Structure formats: structure tokens, C-alpha cells
Amino acid sequence: MLLIQPSILSAQQSETGRLEVQVTDAATNQLTPVRVRLSRHGWVIKKLPKEAVPVMYGVWDHADGYEYQPDSSFYVAGKFSLNLALGTYHLSLAKGPEFLEQQYDLQIKAGQVNQQNYQLKRWINMPEKGWYSADDHIHIRRSPREDSLLLTWTQAEDVHVGVMLRMGDFWETYYPQYAWGEKGVYQKKDYLLTSGQEDPRTPELGHALGIGASDKVRYSKEYYYYDKVFDKLHELGGVSGYAHQAETFHGYRGLTLDGLRGKIDVLELLQFCASDKPLLTAHYYHLLDLGIPITAVAGSDFPWCGKDHDKGPPERSARLGNVRFYTYVDEPFNYNTWKASLAAGHTFVSSGPMLNFEVNGQLPGSKLEVSKGTTLHITAHAYGHSSQVPLQALEIVGHGQVLGRITIKESGQSAEHLSLTLDVPAEQGIWLAARAYGNSSQAAHTTPVYVQVDGKNFYNPATAPHYLKLSEKYLGELRRELKKRRADPQYQAWHYRAGLERRIAETRSLIKEMKKTLK
């Protein structure tokens, strides 16, 4: 057996080399914030450079993380250096879906400095086309001290609008924000942070969203009356809606109760909370087919949703911007122009593919009034990248049905660009949208264009009876829930039975009136 003397072993362990990395944007040649992951033999290097940008984060507002992200990556403002033991290392650099990810194997040698300069290149530039990305669901407490640090995080994921949500439950609130509306905006160039709320949150009605209001809204003694919050958010200049595709926490009940009464503006259509398939449309199409316009938004629910690197594919990791929505802003980009475009519904959601969709030249969210027989010229384009966002299919959807579909197998189409054009006569009101698919976790969907024919609404007469019946089923679920006196303190709806019963009755009256229009 070969024995190594302790003094020699100690000397071997102390041998190191140095890695110095600089990352610039290929378009500007300027240092750019970036997500970095450094590993060796498949194991992350548990040693951080002093340049790693720290912000406290964690579920339930606990200090679960600081400099490392859940997948063991970290953020830097454009450069970092580390002393490392000798050997071969793997370096990953990424900056959101519009930039090409880069992978490198690097050799560290004794006493040597390995200097590397990298440029991050875009495969697409959505801001040049007028589309700005947003993550509407980030849970991190924020004071003015964290603003510049948090902005580096969102810039490193190329999220132009980071909405920091104060979260609430029946008892208290979490992730405090220091200001609201314009006073809570922190902006550098075309990246900004703003405040919002996920409150109320209950297991019987789902999780509510509020974005863009000039103040927070919370009625602790009337906690289950979401409509009071939504009305106040509107009064304060904000938009309201439901999180998690209304799929989890029985959000479809609240969506039905408040959506049919005209209280809802937005729905998170894309997220990794409820399913491995991030795009869930059932509850969205439910409201749309009843003639209720709803804007599609999306958010990561960081640090709650997603899985760590050893439990799933990297794109599913709990990460800022792993899903996002894009808003078209045709004026100088700032908080107010972005908010106005969001209110107008000019959005699409994405976990990779990029979309361009128009009906007679009108953007998603537009209300298009035409006379019967008018030709609707519908164009849809999906953009991807052959290795990073490999497109598979593009569809044009009307009233929930696929009106046209194209795949990469067809002539003139590719994994990088799919295009589809339809010309159809306007026979009745209809909502029209585009959706695209990449790999198993990559999807995109636009907010519809709402076509009204001869002044009539865009609801779907073929499916409306089914959806009204389904609405009654959901309201019946809620009504039965109100009769249960649960021992579990999370379930408090029965305390609010009288007020919720009145709201259910109001919604059922609306359903009755809607049924009359179908006859």
C-alpha cells in the first residue's frame, strides 16, 4: 500500500488556480447580469464568489436561501472570480429564454489564472418588437435596500417587470413591500420592480391577485369577500384576478363567483404549480366561452413553484421568470405605459416560444367590431430556437376549438419559425387566440382578440349551456362547503356563510339571465 506523508498531502490540498469570468451582452458589449452555475463531476461547487448578489428569500418568508438559487446557481452583475482546486469544471451561463444558454468545460491548473470573456447572444429580441416580459408572481420581501440587488436578479433572467407580491392568509401577511403604485416602482432603463398582492388566499376559493394598485387592500374581518378587495383594487387603479390557473386551492370556485359578476381582469394561465404541463386552459376557456374577457398573465410563484435541479428538468426549477407574460408597449417603456397595456390585454404568456398574433391587424386583447360576413384575416407566428426552444406546433383557436394547426413537418415550417394564416367570414361573435408548443415544458398562449358581430357579444352559443351548468356545479360545491364547520383552522368559509350565500345567489341570478339569452 502506498502511504502519503501528511505534510505532502497538505501541500497537495492547498494547490489551487484562479478562475476569472467576464460576461457581456453581445449587442452592447457591456457587462450584463447573468445566472451562473459551476459544477464538477456533476456536483455543484459549494463555494461562492464575493460578486454573487445576495437577497434573502424563502417559503413563508423564511430565510431558506440567500446567494444560492434553489438549483444551486447564483447571480452576478457581469463578472466574478474564484480560487478553485485543480481540475475540470463545468460552467453554465444563462439569461432567460431570449438569450442562448452557454456551457463550457474549464481547466484549473496550479498557480495559473484562467481568464474567460464570454458574450451572451439573443436568438430573439422581443423589446425591439415592442414586447416586454414580466413575472407577475414573485414572493420576496422588499425594502429600498434590496431594490438594486433584486433588479440584478430580474435582469439576470431578462424579466423587464418583476411584480413583488405581498402574500396574505386569514391570519397575517408575508413578504412586506415598502410602497405601492408609482411610489413602489424602482426602474433602471427598461427594467423595473413594482408591488402587488396575493391576498385573499383561502383553500375554499383560491388565491387572488392584485397588480398595479396605488395601495394594498386587505379586509381582515371580511376576508372571504374577495369582491370587496377587487372593487377597491379597481378604484385604486389596479387589475385583479386569480393565480395558479384557478386550478389549485379550488380557485375555479372563486373565479366563477367573481368572474361571472365582472370582478376579474386577469388569470395566471401559465405556471408550474399545478402540473408538469405548464399551460392549463380549462377554466380560462370556461369564462371566455361565456363572453367574459380575461387577460392572460403568468408568473413563477418564486420560491414556491417548481422543482430543484435533482428532482426535475432545469426549466422546472423554482426560478424567477421560468414562466412569464409579454406585454406590448408602443410608447416609451415605463410603469404607467406598461400598466395601461396590461389593462388593455395586449399580452401573451410563455415558457419558451414567442408569439405574434393579429386579427385584421388588431393585437391580443383588442375588441374588434365587424358586420356579419366580414372577412377575418388571422395571422399567427411562433418563434423558437432549434436547440433551446424547439417549436413543435402552432395553433389558431376560436371558441376553444382548433381552427388551424401547423407543425414543423410541413413545408416551409421549422423548429425556429412556424406561421399560419386564416381567412374566415365573421358569422357570429367569437374569441380568437394563438397557442404554440415547444418541448414538454414549453408553451405559449395569447390573450384573445374579441370579435363582436353586429354588436353582439363573443360568447359561444354551442358551449355556453355546458359552461353555465358547470358554473352552477362549482357554486353548489361552494355552498356545500359553507355548511361544514371544519376543525381545521385553515377553513374559515363557514364563518362567512351569510355573505357568501348572498353572492352565490347573485351569481345564480346572472346565470339565469344568461340562459335566457341562449333561447
Image: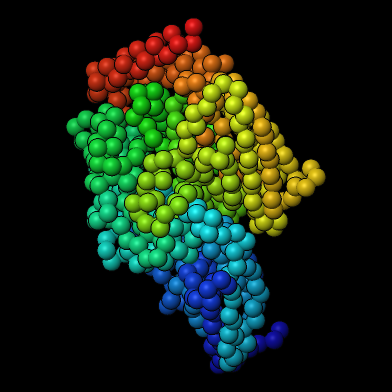
* Residue beneath the point at 32% across and 61% down: 186
Residue 290 visible in image: no
Residue 209 horizontal/vertical position (percent): 36, 40
Q: Is residue 10 left or right of 292 when viewed as pictured?
A: right
Color scheme of the displayed model: rainbow
Numbered disc total = 0
Residue 487 horizontal/vertical position (percent): 30, 27
Q: Is residue 126 left or right of 340 when viewed as pictured?
A: right
- Quadrant of the rendering where the N terminus is positioned: bottom right
In the foreground, 176 or 432: 432
In the displayed structure, 91 sits above or below 293; it is below
In the foreground, 494 or 196: 196
* Residue beneath the point at 39% across and 18% down: 475
Residue 431 horizontal/vertical position (percent): 53, 29
Residue at far top of view: 519
* Residue beneath the point at 29% across and 31% down: 226
Residue at far left of view: 221
* Residue beneath the point at 50% across and 54% down: 130
Residue 479 horizontal/vertical position (percent): 35, 17
Q: Is residue 491 left or right of 103 when viewed as pictured?
A: left
